[in-house]
Amino acid sequence: MPKVNLYATFRDLAGTSQAWVEGCTVGEALKNLVARYPPLGPELFEGGELLERVSVFLEGRDVRYLMGLATPLGEEATLDLFPPVAGGGRFGQVFGALPPWLLEEYLRSWGGEREAEGVFRLPGARVRFCEAPPLEAGGLATCQLRVEVEGEAAKAWFRRIALAASRGGG
């Protein structure tokens, strides 16, 4: 049964950070999630369509770049559901060879506070991240991390993260 990780205001509305729901597609899983937690409905959908401001990731990949709500789900699938963050810009990228634990260390060293798994608050910005499918070449695999930064200071924080990632964290 697919698992849905809920972040920030979605977690507050549902009263839980995780839920397991039936569904063969992303859309079915989200509709079953709303049936269980009705306050999520108007925050996720309008006229049966997923709101543009909502971010849904399947195994670290934005479903908008897959098949949207029609994206098929396996029994062990994990969806990450992020609400919008108001203000400022939004920057995102997949970084290779940047493991989640290392990014967390940097965010903490820069004064970041953990809000939830994969979500940190920095002065003037919120950073969300989740693992992306590894980059594979032959028998070698390198981890990848999808990072999004939003808020009034998003551009500056994104640059700092990108620099740390390009230096191997240094």
Image (spheres, rainbow, N blue to C red):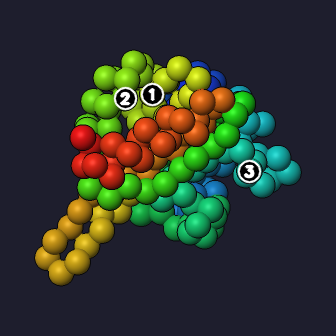
Which residue shows up at 27% across the image and 30% down it? 105
Q: Position of residue 110 (x, y in %)?
A: 37, 23
Residue ranking furthest to the right: 47
Do the numbered discs 1 and 2 sit on residues whose CB atoms are within 8 Å?
A: yes
Amino acid of disc 1: Phe
Q: Quadrant of residue 53?
A: top right
Q: Position of residue 76 (x, y in %)?
A: 36, 56
Q: Nearer the viewer, mark 3 or mark 2?
A: 2
Q: Nearer the viewer, mark 1 or mark 3?
A: 1
Structural distance between the alpha carbons of marks 3 and 2: 28 Å
Mark 1, secondary structure of its residue: strand
Which residue shows up at 30% across the image and 64% down it? 134
Amino acid of disc 3: Glu
Q: Which mark is residue 120?
A: 1
Going from N to C along the chain, the mark reached first, 3 or 2, is 3
Determine which residue is flagged by label 3.
52
Q: Which mark is residue 107?
A: 2
Taking depth in this image into account, of 126 and 130 the one nearest to the observer is 126
Taking depth in this image into account, of 163 and 122 the one nearest to the observer is 163
Answer few, some or many: residues within 10 Å of disc 1's Cα (few below 14, many 20 plus, some between 14 and 19). Answer: many
Q: Position of residue 3 (x, y in %)?
A: 43, 46
Amino acid of disc 2: Leu
- Confirm whether residue 50 shows in the render: yes
